[in-house]
Amino acid sequence: MNSKININKIECHSLEKRNLILIFNKIPAYARMTGKIFLFLAFVICQFTSSYSQDSTISYQIQKNIFSDLEKNKIKYIQKLIDSVGIAAPIPNEVLVKHAAFTTSYNPSHRVPNYVVHVIPKDILYGSATRTNDFRPDPAIKQNMSDSTDYWYSGFDRGHLAASADFKWNRYALSESYFYSNIIPQNKELNQGAWNKLEMQVREWAIDNNELIVVTGPILQDNLPKIPQGSFKVSIPEYIFKIVVDYYAPDFKAIAFIYPNKNVPFELDKHVVSIDSIEKLSGIDFFPKMENEIENTLEAQQDITAFEKNYFKNSSSKISSKNYGKGKINTTQVKEYIDKQACVCGKVVSTKYNENGKTNPTYINLDKKYPEHVFTIMIFGQDRSHFSYVPEVYLQGKEICVKGKISEYKGSPQIIANKENQIEILSK
């Protein structure tokens, strides 16, 4: 897709133009090869639907059909990419099943997957589908399929390999991620802590890099412990890996991680490994369909800065324990003030404005950047007009204080700022 297309120069009724811009944002990487696709859609939406401007029902249905076609084409593209690049060499006794947006290699002996491969498109940024929690057996697998009786009250989380949030661009694909062919028994603290942060980080990289191929799985071996209920045959892996590949020329790059299946700190750099090392541990040959030169290069890489340029600079920065004066606290103290009014001070190290989110939120992180953030200022889209500056731009790098009630969102402290006077700038 030619990203230089100027939508504003296309003659269009204002209502249809808003829908046109929305569709333009939703067109994924596979359509980038030509601008003709978009110009055709522009003609259809602007000319055809405007002729029915007096009948909003007809106009809405036409636009709905266009969105549906885009979603279907996106799924076809993802399936093709997985088939042509993502599937590993055959594994003895595996059951290979292709779903709408992921493929699983199921291991009937261990009753968990060998691995799951999926694609995270850049337009996950615009996805709005939420958790379905409809855990269920995979209907395509008849042999030794695990189910809810294996996991209920087992003491383990039902850990997704392909994270459900990676499919929020399509509700059907998201629901399929709850098949037990995408689940392993995972330590609760790991699943909700460091592993969740890893998944969030990979989604950020997908947005930054247009699209990523992701392969996730357990390290399976003989004599693994079993869940002591249900079938008594679901293996509990000791280690879990995640492989991330940017398959767009000329910047082919890859990175992989392996975490023990227990409560450990996020510490991303301490868990970086090469794909080669995961192949040795798992006995799986990944990416055999790639050109040998590209495969060999990618599988040897383990440089985190290829995806996160300033990772070590940001990770090495220590949280300030500075005394900001009477009535002010720093971010090391903030958890002691949950559900209380306080004035929190620190340095703005990362910002983000999600103009396509449900509430168009702006995130201002103090002292530690996302996803290792320790405190966030949240500004909802409806409140941005209350600021005389662009928050995510003007506040970056500044030392500030914010006043308000401290709440928690997914375990991370935050203050919602809806007025400019809540924020005091200490240094520029």
Image (cartoon, rainbow, N blue to C red):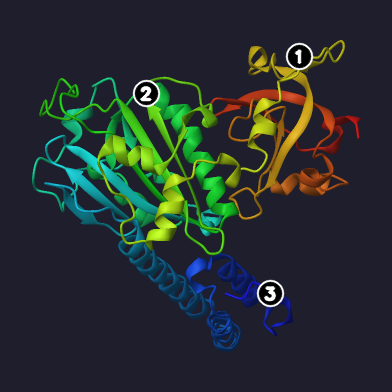
Which residue is drawn at the image coordinates 62% and 35% (left, top)? 370
Q: Is residue 61 left or right of residue 187?
A: right
Find out whether the residues at labels 3 and 1 contact each other: C-beta distance under 8 Å: no
| Number of the label disc, if any, that sits on residue 117 | none
Residue type, label 3:
Lys
Within the image, what quadrant is residue 356 found in? Answer: bottom right
**Do we see residue 218 in this rendering?**
no
User: Residue 7: percent from the left, percent from the top?
Assistant: 68, 76
Q: Sequence order check: which comes first, mark 2 or mark 1?
A: 2
Earlier-in-chain disc, 2 versus 3: 3
Say which amino acid is labelled 1.
Ser
Amino acid marked by disc 2: Lys
| Residue closer to the observer: 204 or 213 | 213
Pick whichever of labels 3 and 1 is earlier in the sequence.
3
Q: Is residue 411 above or below residue 97?
A: above
Q: Is 67 above or below relative to 224?
A: below
Q: Residue visible at 54% across and 40% down?
A: 201
What residue lies at 88% left-to-right and 46% top-to-bottom? 388
Q: CA distance from mark 2 to mark 1?
A: 31 Å
Mark closer to the observer (2, 1): 1
Mark 2, residue position = 188
Q: How far is mark 2 from mark 3, CA to CA?
A: 46 Å
Q: Secondary structure at mark 2?
A: helix
Per the image, the residue denoted by label 1 is 321
> Does residue 96 appear to the left or right of 50 in the view shown?
left
Point out the image quarter for the N terminus.
Answer: bottom right
Q: Which residue is mark 3?
A: 4
Foreground tag (2 vs 3): 3
